[in-house]
Image (tube, rainbow, N blue to C red):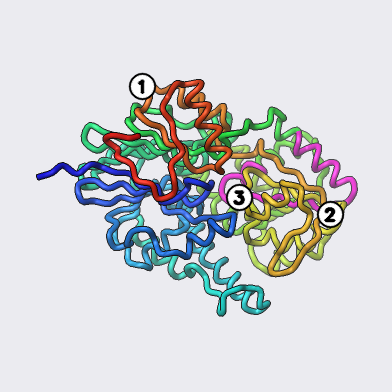
Amino acid sequence: MKHQQATLRFLGATDTVTGSRYLIESGGQRVLVDCGLFQGYKRSRERNRAPFPVAPTSIDAVVLTHAHLDHTGYVPALVRDGFGGPVYATEGTLELCKLILPDSGHLQEEDARYAFDRGSSQYSPPLPLYTAADAVKSLNSFTIHGFDTPLELGGGMELTFLPAGHILGAAQVHVRIGSHSVHFTGDLGRADDPFMYPPRPLAETGVLVTESTYGNRKHSAVDPEKQLGEIITRVAKRGGVIMFAAFAVGRAETLMLYLSRLRRKNAIPDIPVYLNSPMAIDASGMYQRHREEHHLRQDEYENMYKLAKLTRTADESKLLNLRGGPMIIISASGMLTGGRILHHIAAYGPDPKNAIILSGYQAGGTRGAILAAGERELRIYGEGVKIRAEVIQMESLSAHADSDGLIAWMKEAEKEPRMTYITHGEPEASDALRIRIKRELGWRARVPEHLEQISIEDPR
């Protein structure tokens, strides 16, 4: 009988920083590592509507690195369209997905209704990619698997989750296939993250698949706490509203940590702080339940949530748009792709006394990236909104390792991989990291093509 090579196919995240999807085939089994949404440019987003590259019914298992939508957001559609196997995730990832995936379905339904009412969609009628009900149903497929415990997947494949830092539950995924192996970084956290412990050092592997979100950039050396203090003091003095566009899982908590430290030192004015993100509020208890994953002290945790007024209902959110400044609003989404932050920006963005803070990476094609590039008009729910508010991008708040961090992490490996594939980055970032890996480490490295298939046993 002819030996069938184990293969890896890049179904996403090859020419963009979103849509993480990697298909491993071995011994007649198919395992999908990550099942993310494409975000940003329309060309990328349209891939979400295209038929999945392989039949969902032909996939035996899904493995998730962490809960962010660009890694998990297509799971409800995959299950709805026939996938019937297990979705393996850490406990932290499952807990967050219980919040993130139904919220994603709800927002898509809401956006479709809004587009229908406004007549602002090219589709008639506009339909969500999936519904909140689809998302809730997909959660029944999840199976919790812990860190550092090998799991047999069939087809000779063995999976191990390793801590990645980044956010709660985030994992690197190591897949062993006989004497061969492939290692996925997922999103790799920072060595100096104020919340999370550093990612586990790179173990020996034949094939490495690394993210490259910040592959061509280094995080600012500016102290983010000091920078935040200066911004808030400046804007509050002119009576402005400070709008933090925060990723509801990870960055919202980091912002509240810095704000609580600043408030305790009397380094910022005593103005109201509103956490206007039901998801971030619901995620707060996770830090208590998963203390082994982070180094946040109990007193800091308590001070964070004493600081902010928690805004849950839509009516409470609408009232914030009538209140005026000075005040601080922390709301999702971090790249301005949807959520309550858009309503706040529509209300307060046209006034120059206010400020919008982008708290991390902005994928190309998103409203956040448009603002970060200097454009000062946003299309929000079919209408143009002039942005005269001050706009600040604080990449120092990112939860991703930067280019130096990625190279430093790779340098710790005892043995170089036979091939490193650079994914999950914009083309410039991926290629810049490829060059650094080859020049500084002397490793073989490539940026794969969308839908390209390679041999795990003989990578090229």
Q: Which residue is mark 3?
A: 247
Residue 237 within the segment the image draws in magenta: yes
Q: Amino acid at mark 2?
A: Arg
- Quadrant of the rendering where the C terminus is positioned: top left
Picture coordinates of residue 154 (x, y %)? 21, 47
Q: Is the residue 71 above or below the residue 295 in the image? A: below
Q: Dot 2 corresponds to which residue? A: 388
Q: Is residue 347 magenta?
A: no
Q: Nearer the viewer, mark 3 or mark 2?
A: 2
Residue named by callout 1: 415
How far is disc 3 from disc 2 in space, using C-alphas? 23 Å
Identified by mark 1, the residue type is Lys
Q: Looking at the picture, how far across and down is residue 220, in whole percent?
A: 68, 31
The magenta-colored residue range is 227-256
**With respect to residue 265, does 69 lie above or below?**
below
Outermost residue toward the right in this view: 238
Above or below 397: residue 244: below
Labels 1, 3: front one: 1
Q: Nearer the viewer, residue 70 or 304?
A: 70
Given the current orientation, which residue lies at the most extreme left position?
1
User: How far is the residue under mark 1 from the one under mark 3?
Assistant: 35 Å
Secondary element under disc 3, as helix, strand or loop, is loop
Q: Amino acid at mark 3?
A: Phe
* Residues packed near mark 2 inside 10 Å, few (<14), some (14 to 19) or many (20 plus): some
Residue at the image position 76 percent from the left and 35 percent from the top: 227
State left or right for residue 384 relative to residue 13: right
**What is the crowding at mark 1: few (fewer than 14 residues within 10 Å), some, or many (at least 20)?**
few
Question: What percent of the width, then of the height, locates residue 251?
Answer: 61, 45
